[in-house]
Image: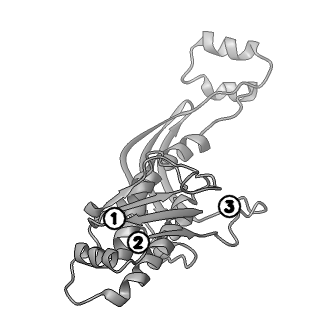
Amino acid sequence: GGALVHVYKDGSVLATHGGVEMGQGLHVKMAQIVSKVLGIPMSFISICSSTSTDKVPNTSATAASVGSDLYGMAIKEACEIIYKRLEPILEPDMKWTEIVSKAYESSISLSSTGHYSVKGLGMDWTQGKVGPIIILLMAWVHPLGALCLRSEVVMDLGESLNPAIDVGKSRAPSCRATGSLSWNSYFTLLKASSLRKVCSDEVLQWICRNKKLISLQVQVTTKSQFNVSLLRGSKNVRAVFSSKAV
């Protein structure tokens, strides 16, 4: 993944990366990284809203939960290069705008690119897993549906760059997983007897007339408590600031 960072004379910073913002907070996280590396407020930082190959070529797909890992490290590298150029002119208690103005007058380059690739990234297809997640589900189940009384989800996201975003992004797939795992793939005639308590005679006759296996979806209603938390003390040395992408 690549990134391009420009610092302008007024102190404003424009960062461009190869990722696509799909409403998942990628731009916010990239701005946070710029803020932390350069030590400036978020108000100085803008992220280019559209991915453009004339600025960052040969981009990688924003998929498989690697967006903030790839582009976060690339932006971090670009900002570190710029900051290293500024170190010789730094003085105690200098404001950011003063530092940038002095750098411009000293003909110091205030633009840099960054690049990063994640080594050893992949899924264990033999185990069918790529990362740990713990879900404790308490549900009341009946033949045609279920009422989810309580869900406890713990996600391993390392040292989260933005817990509010990451928890929000974890809620939706957790709900989707609950629905997927409750998919009752097949109802056979042998199971029809268990439906007599809740189905009318007409429905049972319709089931019996269909000799093929019938696929029905069990409705799961989430009620009461749905809690998502992040695992503590889990660091990722291969991603930006020990975080893990969602």
Q: Which amino acid does the dot numbered 3 rest on?
A: Lys
Kindly state the secondary structure of the residue where label 1 is placed: loop
Instruction: Look at mark 3 in the image and give the residue it sits on.
Output: 129
**Residue at 80% across, 18% down:** 211
Is 226 placed above or below 189 here? below
Mark 3 crowd level (few <14, some 14–19, many ≥20, 10 Å Cα): few
Q: Is residue 96 visible?
A: yes
Left or right of 29? Residue 59 is right
Is 138 placed above or below 231 here? above
- Earlier in the chain: of badge 2 and badge 3, it is 2
Instruction: Look at mark 2 in the image and give the residue it sits on.
Output: 110
Q: For the residues marked 1 and 3, what is the alpha-carbon distance in whole angstroms?
A: 45 Å
Q: Which amino acid does the dot numbered 2 rest on?
A: Leu
Is 26 placed above or below 36 here? above
- Earlier in the chain: of badge 1 and badge 3, it is 1
Q: Is residue 228 visible?
A: no
Residue 166: where, in percent of width, then height?
43, 58
Residue 135: where, in percent of width, then height?
51, 58
Q: For the residues marked 2 and 3, what is the alpha-carbon distance in whole angstroms?
A: 43 Å
Quadrant, the N terminus: bottom right
Residue 84: where, in percent of width, then height?
43, 84
Kindly state the secondary structure of the residue where label 3 is placed: loop
Mark 1 crowd level (few <14, some 14–19, many ≥20, 10 Å Cα): some
Instruction: Look at mark 1 in the image and give the residue it sits on.
Output: 8
**Residue at 28% across, 63% down:** 44
